[in-house]
Amino acid sequence: MSVSIKAKSSSGDSFYTVDFITKNDTLFVLCDCPAGEWGKFCKHKWQLLNGDETMLADVEEHSKLVAMNQLAVEKGLNDLYKDIDVLEKQKVIVAKEQKKQKSAVKKALSKKKVLTEDEFLEVHAPLYAADKNIAYITYLMAKEKEVLEKKLKDGF
Ligand SMILES: [Zn+2]
């Protein structure tokens, strides 16, 4: 079975075609956007798989979207997504911490006293830790997205 759905391009003035193909009970998802063709993370595929109707270039294709989302869920889409979902939640928590530490640094630096280098570094340590944490989570998410893309290409 093969179903094609047109997904909006980010500029909104054109569309890409996402193909959902089942062969021997395995679902393959392909997109003809530049990212999709290079095997990079393609939001057209993922948002359509997740049933995101704002991605539809043609509202008439809504029932196809619902059907493909159902199929993907039955095929274990949620399991595919689990790792990235965990990372996304972690990122939100660390981003909050980062924001908190940024204002703590701002407050500490606004005092009249001139800090020594050690004191300066000490004031910044929690912020640097949060920055490093965010950088690592972002890296992991990029790697995880590569894995997800491969799974769509190899079928699931
Ligand atoms: Zn795409």
Image (cartoon, rainbow, N blue to C red):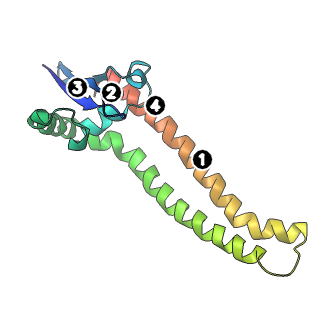
Tell me if I can see residue 13 in this picture: yes
Identify the mark nearer the N-term, 3 or 2. 3
The numbered disc on residue 136 is 1
Q: Amino acid at mark 1?
A: Tyr
Q: Amino acid at mark 3?
A: Leu
- Give the answer, above or below, for where 12 lies relative to 104: above
Mark 1 and mark 4 in contact (Cβ < 8 Å)?
no
Identify the mark nearer the N-term, 4 or 1. 1
Q: Horizontal and vertical percent for residue 75?
A: 21, 35
Identify the mark nearer the N-term, 4 or 3. 3
View quadrant of ligand 1 = top left
The answer to whether the beta carbon of the residue marked 4 is less than 8 Å from any atom of ligand 1 is no
| Secondary structure state at the residue bearing disc 4 | helix
The numbered disc on residue 100 is none
- Pointer 3 residue: 27
Residue drawn at x 39%, y 49% is: 85
Disc 4 residue crowd, few under 14, some 14–19, many 20+, Cα 10 Å:
some
- Give the answer, above or below, for where 122 lies relative to 2: below
- Pointer 4 residue: 146
Identify the mark nearer the N-term, 1 or 2. 1
Identify the mark nearer the N-term, 3 or 1. 3
| Secondary structure state at the residue bearing disc 3 | strand
| Secondary structure state at the residue bearing disc 1 | helix
Q: CA distance from mark 4 to mark 3?
A: 18 Å
Q: CA distance from mark 1 to mark 2?
A: 25 Å
Tell me if I can see residue 28 in this picture: no
Q: Amino acid at mark 4?
A: Glu
